[in-house]
Amino acid sequence: MSAAAASGAADGAPIIEARGAARTFRVSAGLFKGKHTLRAVDGVDLAIRPGEVVALVGESGCGKTTLARMLLGLLAPSSGDIRINGKPSGSLARREIARLVQPVFQDPYSSLNPRKSVGSIITLPFRAQRDPEPATWRKRVEEMMERVGLARRLYDNYPSQLSGGQRQRVAIARALINQPRLVICDEPTSALDVSVQSQILNLLEDLRRSMGLTYLLISHNLAVVEHMATRVAVMYLGRIVEEAETDALFRAPRHPYTRALLQSVLTPEPGRGVPDTGLGAAYPDPLAVPPGCRFHPRCAQAVAHCRTHAPTPIASGAGFVECHLYDASLQREMPK
């Protein structure tokens, strides 16, 4: 069992839930070619319960960040529903969503205002939420700074005077200062030096335990996912194609795409070289989603049915898999 899973199972109603959530954009197809519809997120169901660390994984362009922006209330779904504490996100004021759900972005260099001091940056949520006790702001900010590993003497410093790791700690302190229920971490360590990444990950895990936080972790780093997550959702071309508890997914991945992702992880074993996932060098084109199963052009196990019929979710343990390989009515057609 992973360390995150051992820390306690999630319970209770979902903090946030996507129900058939979709988001489309109109994008230019090139000079004189007009605009095409891009379905960045296409009918996603996802529920995150108290105490969970749900990891969202998949290749670049699969819709992870668009889904995160929808969950944060920064993008409205084109169809479907986002619910926060059981209420439609569209019925909640932006300030109320921000009080419950906060982000930690990928790049601490661009997510902090270079003209504001550390203290001012972390205090900003108090101002935005109209906190009624301004006399206590500095004390509470300094306490949060210490909690995330920042010395109080940095209160009046500016981001340019900090290291990358310190800047990310400022971003984490800003996200947590109003004690949100859910923190969405979008690649929180990928812009940092390798030597600092483990420190930030350990900090996030310590804060989760001590503050009772819930995380949605968006990451390409499957080693991080295996260490931190209690549950994993695998996304491909706008759909979640597999969802499972972390231990089960890493031990016995079911969807061919999930297996390919896990095979792509580099190993320190001598002589193994760079792994071949069988997916090819090019990413799928979200402007040209294939008919049927959207993964079939890259799937070695695809059959004729996959090219014409979209799969539906099939229950699998505590999660599901969206693949014809597990449809009992089609077993005779499937390769052994």
Image (spheres, rainbow, N blue to C red):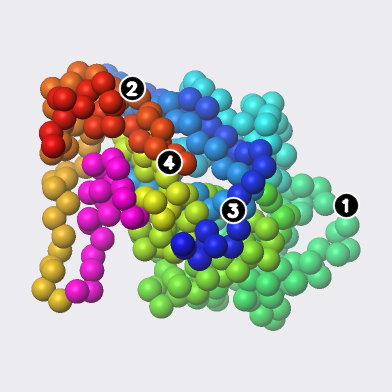
> Which residue is labeled 1 in the image?
132
Q: Which stretch appears magenta? A: 250-269
Badge 2 local density, few (<14 within 10 Å), some, or many (20+)?
A: some
Examine the image and state in which quarter residue 47 appears: top right
184 relative to 27, above or below: below
Q: Label 4 neighbourhood size at 10 Å, few (<14), some (14-19), many (20+)?
A: few
Of the pair 224 and 285, the residue shown nearer to us: 224
Marks 1 and 4, how far apart in space? 47 Å
Q: Residues within 10 Å of mark 1 (few under 14, many from 20)?
A: few
Whole-percent x and y of residue 22?
45, 26
Q: Amino acid at mark 2?
A: Thr
Q: CA distance from mark 2 to mark 4?
A: 35 Å
Mark pair 2, 1: CA separation: 46 Å
The span from disc 3 to disc 2 (Cα, nearest Å) is 40 Å
Where is residue 174 drawn, in percent x and y?
65, 59
Q: Which numbered tag is attached to residue 317?
A: 4
